[in-house]
Amino acid sequence: MADFWDRIQILEGDITDLKVDAIVNAANNSLLGGGGVDGAIHRAAGPELLDECRKMNGCETGAAKISGAYRLPARYIIHTVGPVWQGGNHNEPELLAACYRNTMLCALENEVKTVAFPAISCGIYGFPAERATVIAVNEVYGFLIGCDQIERVVFVCFNTEMLSIYQSVLDTTI
């Protein structure tokens, strides 16, 4: 197996273009599409995704559910609902950590070897990017330490600023 840190990658780009086993959708509770990465994933996957998501009966904040990826190059989409930032006193950090843990568990249960995450809750949900990134890296790091099945995790950043934040957090974690 590759060195542990070779299993984590950061890139700036469009998560819908990645050929991985699973991409993660930063979804809303309905799972029926929305703005940001959620809307982009629904548009790129096609109407079949919406049909499947209608049957899933939504998703609680912090939980994760898996669907097909349809027109995307990935095999699956793992939908997780991040918390809306309300100042940090409404369990937002714990709920965000649960998003990453539950997504990784879902990946493991479905024999996913490569998974790509967006910056969950960092867009319109307003979670402070640096705090969210520390949570993301710590949760993924903690999971990968005890799991050889997942071979690669990609953090996909929506802009250069987010990429820089992820790089800084990873540099201090190593």
Image (spheres, rainbow, N blue to C red):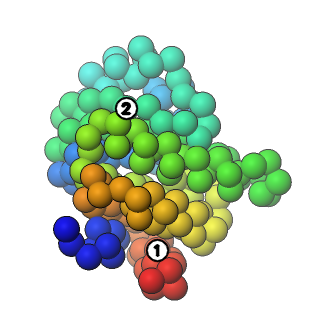
Can residue 173 be spotted in the picture? yes
Quarter of the image that includes the N terminus: bottom left
Q: Looking at the image, is mark 2 or mark 1 earlier in the sequence?
A: 2
Residue furthest to the front? 146
Whether residue 11 sits left or right of residue 32 in the image: it is: left
| Dot 2 alpha-carbon crowd within 10 angstroms: few under 14, some 14 to 19, many 20 or more | many
Question: Which residue is at 43% across, 31% downward?
Answer: 65
Hey, what amino acid is under mark 2? Ile
Which secondary structure lies at badge 2?
strand
Front-lying residue, 67 or 72 = 67
Whether residue 11 sits left or right of residue 61 in the image: it is: left
Return the residue at label 1.
166
Quadrant location of residue 68?
top left
Return the residue at label 2.
66
**95 up-or-down from 168: above or below:** above
Question: Which residue is at 29% across, 58% downward?
Answer: 148
Residue 109, image x, y percentages:
35, 36
> Disc 2 vs disc 1: Cβ atoms closer than 8 Å?
no
Residue 140, image x, y percentages:
45, 60
Quadrant location of residue 146?
bottom left
Q: Which mark's residue is nearer the viewer, 2 or 1?
A: 2
Question: Which residue is at 59% across, 41% downward?
Answer: 62
